[in-house]
Image (tube, rainbow, N blue to C red):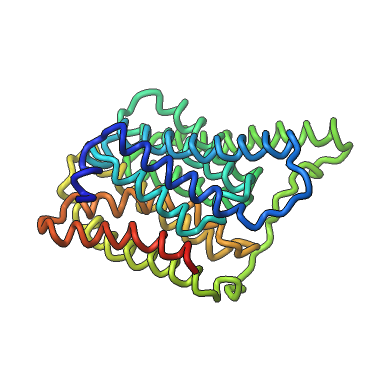
Amino acid sequence: MITSIFNKSKPINFIIVLFITVLAFITARENLVIETVTTAFVVKQMAVFFICIATILIFNFIISKNNLTKTNTYEILLFSLFLLAMVQTTSHTNILLSNLFVLLGLRRIISLRSQKSIKSKLFDAALWVAVASLFYFWAILFVIVIILSLIFYSDNNIRHWIIPFIGVATVFSIMVGVSVVVYYDFFEIFKSSRSVSYDFSPYNSTKYLMAITMLFSFGIWSSIFYLQSIKRKKKELRASFKIVIIAAIMAFVLILLAPQKNGSEFLFLFAPLAIIITNYIEIIEDKWFKEVFLAVLVLIPFLLLML
């Protein structure tokens, strides 16, 4: 039933995804108590919600443009379900913006497979990742994805290896200049925390443990088949699928390093994980197992709302 609905790209699928996203957004704010609802508050919440929707649309565009999955909408369904499983991801504007810029960077990295405008794409990718790090410092880890992509594409042009660093340096130089003009200090503008925390006690609750277990159990199981399937992909597409798995690894490292373990840091993992799991769903031959697999992914986030 569920697979038949999302097996094709239909308008109703996007409406369902929108509903789940709205539910996640509202649930994250159900305990928000304010004396008066001001215009500024409404505008801010609308802007944050727009970022959530923009993220899903850009994510869908990246997938369809680069053939990372077949013609279906499993990936955006999974992304919205992940938001519902960890509603905290819709509450932190800095992380939402950082993840959005990371996705824009990944879009440029994955498009390297066309081997056109390589210098421009490398510079843009590094630029977007550097901008993402201004909102959440550890997003800078995704620069590693850019560097590894050059290995995947067997690029021996030394100038291409230098360009990502130029892109990061460009953003840094601009922000230092802005900081001097606005704050009369070179580094005052860099407020994003660069600290590291290995205190995972904030995850010690039923909701967190169930959500994290769902993400990692389904993610690890799907990754095993995902890695095996890369060899069967068309040669020109293999690098793109490798980039996805590296992005997932970097997101996992980011979660480990996150200075504040409040759940929002898992947002960086949602996009690559949704692609990996979708690819696994597509290769499941037993229809009943596919239905059960997807049904569990759908039910768990809704069950978590009751806790």
The residue sitting at 24% across, 39% down in the picture is 72
Query: How many badges with numbers are in the image?
Result: 0
The answer to which of 258 and 13 lies nearer the viewer is 13
Q: Is residue 130 visible?
A: no
Q: Is residue 47 left or right of residue 179?
A: left
* Residue 302, image x, y percentages: 41, 59
Q: Which quadrant of the view contains residue 240?
A: top left
Q: Which quadrant of the view contains residue 293?
A: bottom left
The residue sitting at 68% across, 37% down in the picture is 42
* Residue 190, image x, y percentages: 74, 45
The answer to which of 216 and 299 lies nearer the viewer is 299
Q: Is residue 292 above or below residue 270?
A: below
Q: Which quadrant of the view contains residue 19?
A: top left
Residue found farthest to the right: 184
* Residue 204, image x, y percentages: 55, 76
* Residue 1, image x, y percentages: 19, 50
The residue sitting at 82% across, 40% down in the picture is 186
Residue found farthest to the left: 286
The answer to which of 265 and 15 lies nearer the viewer is 15
Q: Is residue 211 visible?
A: yes
Residue found farthest to the top: 117
Q: Is residue 259 left or right of residue 208?
A: right
The residue sitting at 44% across, 67% down in the picture is 212
